[in-house]
Image (cartoon, rainbow, N blue to C red):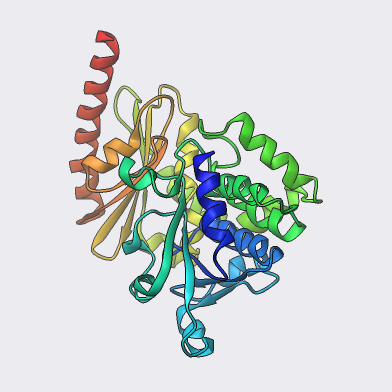
Amino acid sequence: MRMINLFKSLTEKAKNIVITTHIQPDADGIGSEIALCLALREIGKNAICVNEEPLLERYRYLDPKDCVTSYDEYMKSRQEGQTVDLFIVTDTNSLSRIGNNLQTLVPNAKNLLFIDHHPAPKELAAIHCIDTKMAATGELVGTLIESLGVTFTRDMAYALYTSILIDTSSFRYPTVTGNTHRIIAKLMDTGIEPPEAYNKIYGTKKISYMQMLGVVLASAESTDDGRIAWLSLTEENLNKFNVDTEDTHGLVNYLLILDNIRVACMFRQIGKMVKISFRSAGDIDVGVMAQALGGGGHDHSAATVIEGEINEVIKETVPKLQMMLDDHEEEEQKG
């Protein structure tokens, strides 16, 4: 109730509203900002989504009303002296993640509001709309839109359905609740067809993708006890099979079906850095593990980036994960 009151208070007194999300946005951030923009326009607000970069072609179908523009285009079309009454950031609670250009707009905005479901300091969460119990930012945005008395349109629903679909790995994560499905039901009532929504966001694949998938899955390894398993993805793999990086994000989820698995990882070489994506099977908090390695995220899905060559990073990282997992299981036994 507190978040709803805060959201309604800030939006009621704002006329010009800018909405953004993090750089290299995923469908949760994009879907959330688009749906929120459409809803605010429904109640007469001058709302626009401004991202650091233009929307990628693969996401344009989520934005049939052209809500999203880039920072450069926004600055070209912005009227002289126009104020920003409310600056909303979706799917992150860190200004450093929205991009250097977007950050320059914040000091001149009358109010700032984060709408997010990622972990945040309690002091920050107290004055923003941050709810880590939500399965996706899209679920939270859907709740906030309803609080405005706005009826979901199909365009809003498509954006939100996709955001929740992506951020729950097709409703497989433990954060999915009855409320998640109640929101989904209302979105589907607008005419959303799940097979179409799934195929559009995940895309139909070329044979080269299947060949790349075979190579990556063949790289699967695990510790002797099977509690930790991992995949390796190199730049050579991506270049050889001409696969979009966006199509690799969910590969780590294949490991969650393994016997005894508790922590699944994917190591991906990006230049001189290695990105490690973590997934949890059960009650293991991979967000804490990622934080210990310089990253962060949710308890079931997290990531970090480490400098080095992929094979060396794997050799250094897996033993650390084993130690953290051993410590967790010792605490379980004591409890």
Whole-percent x, y for residue 56 in the image: 54, 71
Whole-percent x, y for residue 229 in the image: 36, 34
For the image, the number of numbered tags is 0
- Which one is in front, 307 or 76? 76
Whole-percent x, y for residue 29 in the image: 51, 57
Q: Is residue 50 visible?
A: yes
- Which one is in front, 206 or 184? 184
Q: In the rendered view, would you say 154 is above or below 297?
A: below
Would residue 123 appear left or right of 84 to someone viewing this image?
left
> Which picture quadrant has residue 335?
top left
**Residue at x 28% of width, y 18% of height:** 329
Q: In the rendered view, would you say 325 is above or below 276?
A: above
- Which one is in front, 302 or 246? 302
**Residue at x 36% of width, y 27% of height:** 284
Q: Quadrant of the N terminus?
A: top right
Would residue 116 appear left or right of 196 to someone viewing this image?
left
Whole-percent x, y for residue 316 in the image: 18, 42
Q: Is residue 121 visible?
A: no
> Which picture quadrant has residue 172?
top right
**Residue at x 27% of width, y 26% of height:** 325
- Which one is in front, 86 or 200? 86
